[in-house]
């Protein structure tokens, strides 16, 4: 038993160190195109880096701090995509720019993987995700449930193993090590949210992105300013939301750091509640507090708990 525990610990350390090496290589200007994995955004890049364990150089098309819905590829990002050996994107309508981008550089020998495919996604209230071509009105923000990220890790493991079968066992070990970290994150989030009284576990956000998170952890999404970035709300919708916040005694409202929070700040002032403007969802940050997915989730939960309890 002790030997198995030690092996797992050693494996976690090994994979973690190799991830750091891969991230250092990722920051360099040169790209090893023989082992290059490209993702649509930085959150997915972190997942792939953890499973790849340094054996692939991992690059994200949409850089940190960029909205993955509306990112516009540059000539440099198109060139990077054309060099990839394997490509990962979220799908479910998140990347409105994806289809035309991948069509422009698609190579039959390159594996292109939609990580959300096959998952039971949550339906949106409208026929589409704001102005962003949401697939059949489905919510794409699957990764905000760490338990579902474990499914992403399985898909990444299987894909890397097909592309580089020699190291299939290594990818399986790194996937298991990362999934164990996700289990630890899941337990921690549940424990932290117990600090918030049940009657106050209500979310009002700028962008409608936290349904999977709320479903996993017993919160209720009571409203949002925009269903998707780029779709401005009407004055009546804002007034109705302000009135709802007052009536339901919602303690705080939240916005992501990547968006202009002016509308939400005005709403919070009119409703007389706290406003938090530094959550993250579709993009990591350059450095703390959200430079990895696990750091991002811990930061978001800390912000929520402090504002709601």
Image: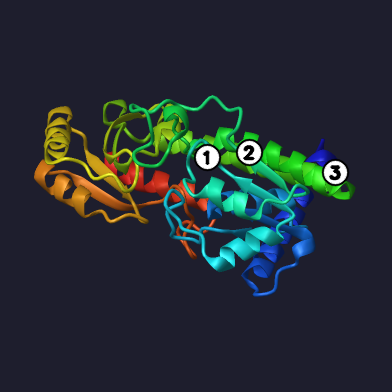
Q: Which residue is mark 2?
A: 152
Q: Is the residue 245 above or below the residue 300 in the image?
A: above
Residue nearer the viewer, 191 or 112: 112
- Classify 10 Å Cα crowding around label 1: few (below 14), some (14-19), many (20 and above): many
Residue 61 position, x and y percent, is 56, 58
CB atoms at circles 3 and 2 under 8 Å apart? no
Examine the rendering and report whether any part of residue 7 can be seen: no
- Which numbered disc flags the more N-terminal residue, 3 or 1? 1
Residue at 37 percent of width and 56 percent of height: 258
Which SS class for mark 3? helix
Q: Position of residue 235 (x, y in %)?
A: 12, 41
Label drawn at residue 156:
none
Looking at the rendered structure, which numbered label has been put on residue 169? 3
Q: Is residue 303 left or right of residue 13?
A: left
Q: Quadrant of the N terminus?
A: top right
> Which quarter of the rendered picture does the C terminus lie within?
top left
Which residue, given by chain and number where applicable, does mark 1 sit on? 143
Residue 63 shows in the view: yes
Query: Given this view, does label 3 or label 2 mark the residue nearer the observer?
Result: 2
């Amino acid at each position: 038993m002790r030997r198995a525990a030690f092996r797992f610990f050693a494996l976690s350390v090994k994979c973690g160190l190799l991830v750091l090496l891969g991230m250092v290589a990722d920051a360099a200007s040169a790209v090893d195109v023989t082992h290059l994995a490209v993702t649509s955004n930085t959150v997915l890049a972190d997942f792939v880096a953890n499973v790849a364990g340094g054996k692939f150089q991992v690059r994200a098309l949409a850089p940190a701090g960029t909205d993955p819905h509306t990112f516009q590829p540059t000539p440099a990002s198109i060139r990077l995509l054309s060099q990839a050996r394997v490509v990962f994107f979220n799908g479910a309508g998140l990347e409105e720019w994806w289809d035309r981008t991948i069509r422009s550089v698609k190579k039959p020998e390159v594996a292109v993987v939609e990580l959300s495919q096959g998952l039971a996604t949550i339906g949106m209230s409208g026929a589409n995700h704001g102005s962003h071509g949401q697939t059949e009105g489905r919510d794409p923000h699957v990764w905000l449930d760490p338990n579902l990220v474990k499914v992403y890790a399985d898909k990444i493991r299987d894909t890397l193993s097909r592309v580089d079968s020699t190291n299939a066992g290594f990818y399986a070990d790194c996937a298991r090590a990362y999934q164990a970290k996700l289990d630890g994150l899941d337990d921690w989030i549940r424990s932290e949210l117990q600090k918030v009284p049940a009657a106050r576990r209500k979310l009002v956000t700028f962008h409608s992105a936290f349904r999977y998170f709320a479903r996993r952890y017993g919160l209720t999404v009571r409203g949002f300013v925009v269903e998707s970035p780029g779709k401005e709300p009407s004055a009546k919708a804002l007034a109705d939301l302000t009135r709802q916040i007052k009536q339901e005694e919602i303690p705080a409202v939240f916005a992501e750091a990547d968006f202009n929070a002016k509308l939400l700040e005005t709403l919070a002032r009119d409703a007389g509640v706290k406003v938090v403007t530094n959550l993250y969802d579709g993009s990591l940050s350059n450095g703390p507090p959200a430079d990895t997915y696990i750091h991002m989730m811990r930061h978001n939960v800390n912000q929520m708990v402090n504002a709601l309890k």
